[in-house]
Image (cartoon, grey):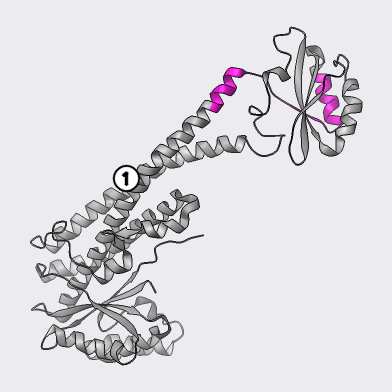
């Protein structure tokens, strides 16, 4: 399970008692979840007005930062192409896997100094993650363009003889070049029509050079043949060829052009390899940064919501529960029994949603008598 429930409850006489109580209710007797204390430092509370406003802002910031974390993770998967199984091992926070980071969370005092106001800390996160988002857009756009251009060229060099580039198939010696009167043409002939071609190509129009056809290349369905004829017969030959199910390719042998295409392909391929390493490194570093920022936002939300709900002085225990998948419903019931005295209206909502009243869709709001936020470390959506 990569899903965690980040909750908080008011301190009893001590916060340790709150912790012991939940451990007894959820873990020691019935193995409903694996629990860790979630350490939030003594942050500056500020005024009630600021906290109320911040509560809404943090909800939006949480959604934005989560979307950036997912974007970076998904783009890492796209960039690693065939090594998608390696994606997970590159998605680390502070050098450790995400579950370890979340369960052993420590506030980063250097990045987010706790002497600053809560609003300032949230603005630091917002600015930092917006920068990552903008950088990702720019880097992804440049790399995708390069990859797209390379794929287009690769596509040209593959596929059917009717459409693919012929540059890597033909050689100079296959053509009559620099002749005022003669021209060599390339014709795609279905394999089932080889015999017809050999019998008829010399008579498709006047002025076809006898015995001038050679098979240069075959794919699954067709063969590529040369034929030499007088320039003045081109249109007539093309028309008669089409009537006989032979396709004349528009192709002029141009060494410079073909060389330029090959060089372009080599250049794009080299550029892609050059950009790949630094891009993956940037994605690793910035995934870690964004994920760390996201968990700090969760910590801020728990702090603000706990102060708003449980009052001052600050006295609550934040806890990270990793539910046992089979027992999620039971765990929710145990928590509601444990904390329903904190908020009777939430308990009423829970009772109503348990009854599934038609048209009353309150269960989606995920409001509980205790402070609750979900953290899901499964960030990849593999198609």
Toward the viewer: 7 or 108? Answer: 108
Side (left or right) of 165 relative to 202: left
Query: What secondary structure is marked by label 1?
Result: helix
Taking 280 as reference, is 355 above or below it? below
- The quadrant in which residue 100 appears is bottom left
Answer whether residue 362 is visible to the viewer in this image.
no
Residue at (56%, 34%) from the top-left corner? 153
- The quadrant in which residue 243 appears is top right
* Location of residue 93 in the rendering, given as x and y in whole percent from the top left corner: 29, 60
Q: Is residue 251 located in the magenta-colored stretch of the structure? A: yes
Which residue lies most toward the top here?
Answer: 180
Q: Quadrant of the N terminus?
A: bottom left
Q: Which residue is the site of mark 1?
A: 135
Crowding around mark 1 (Cα neighbors within 10 Å: few <14, some 14 to 19, many 20+) is some
* Location of residue 146 in the rendering, given as x and y in whole percent from the top left corner: 46, 37
Question: Which span is picked out in magenta?
Answer: 235-262
* Location of residue 39 in the rendering, given as x and y in whole percent from the top left corner: 18, 72
Toward the viewer: 60 or 91? Answer: 91
Of helix, strand and loop, which mostly describes the magenta segment?
helix
Side (left or right) of 235 relative to 19: right
């Amino acid at each position: 399970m990569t899903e965690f429930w980040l909750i908080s409850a008011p301190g009893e006489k001590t916060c340790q008692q709150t912790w012991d109580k939940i451990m007894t209710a959820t873990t020691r007797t019935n193995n409903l979840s694996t629990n860790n204390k979630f350490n939030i430092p003594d942050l500056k509370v500020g005024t009630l007005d600021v906290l109320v406003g911040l509560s809404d802002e943090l909800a939006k910031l949480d959604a934005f930062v989560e979307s950036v974390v997912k974007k970076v993770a998904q783009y890492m998967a796209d960039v690693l192409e065939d090594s998608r199984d390696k994606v997970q091992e590159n998605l680390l926070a502070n050098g450790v896997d995400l579950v370890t980071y979340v369960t052993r969370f420590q506030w980063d005092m250097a990045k987010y100094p706790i002497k600053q106001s809560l609003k300032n800390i949230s603005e630091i996160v917002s600015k930092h993650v917006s920068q990552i988002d903008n950088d990702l857009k720019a880097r992804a756009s440049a790399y995708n363009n390069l990859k797209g251009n390379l794929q287009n060229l690769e596509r040209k060099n593959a596929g059917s003889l009717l459409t693919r580039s012929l540059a890597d198939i033909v050689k100079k010696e296959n053509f009559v070049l620099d002749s005022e009167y003669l021209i060599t043409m390339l014709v795609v002939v279905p394999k089932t029509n080889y015999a017809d071609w050999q019998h008829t190509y010399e008579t498709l129009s006047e002025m076809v050079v006898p015995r001038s056809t050679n098979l240069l290349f075959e794919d699954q369905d067709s063969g590529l043949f040369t034929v030499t004829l007088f320039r003045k017969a081109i249109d007539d030959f093309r028309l008669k060829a089409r009537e006989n199910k032979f396709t004349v390719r528009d192709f002029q042998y141009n060494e410079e052009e073909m060389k330029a295409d090959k060089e372009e392909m080599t250049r794009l391929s080299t550029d892609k390899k050059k950009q790949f390493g630094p891009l993956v490194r940037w994605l690793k570093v910035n995934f870690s940064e964004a994920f760390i920022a996201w968990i700090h936002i969760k910590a801020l939300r728990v702090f603000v919501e706990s102060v708003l709900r449980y009052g001052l002085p600050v006295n609550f225990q934040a806890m990270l529960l990793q539910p046992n998948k089979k027992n999620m419903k039971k765990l929710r019931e145990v928590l509601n029994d444990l904390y329903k005295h904190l908020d009777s209206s939430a308990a009423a909502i829970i009772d109503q949603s348990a009854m599934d009243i038609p048209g009353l869709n309150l269960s989606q709001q995920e409001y509980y008598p205790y402070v609750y936020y979900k953290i899901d470390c499964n960030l990849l959506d593999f198609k």
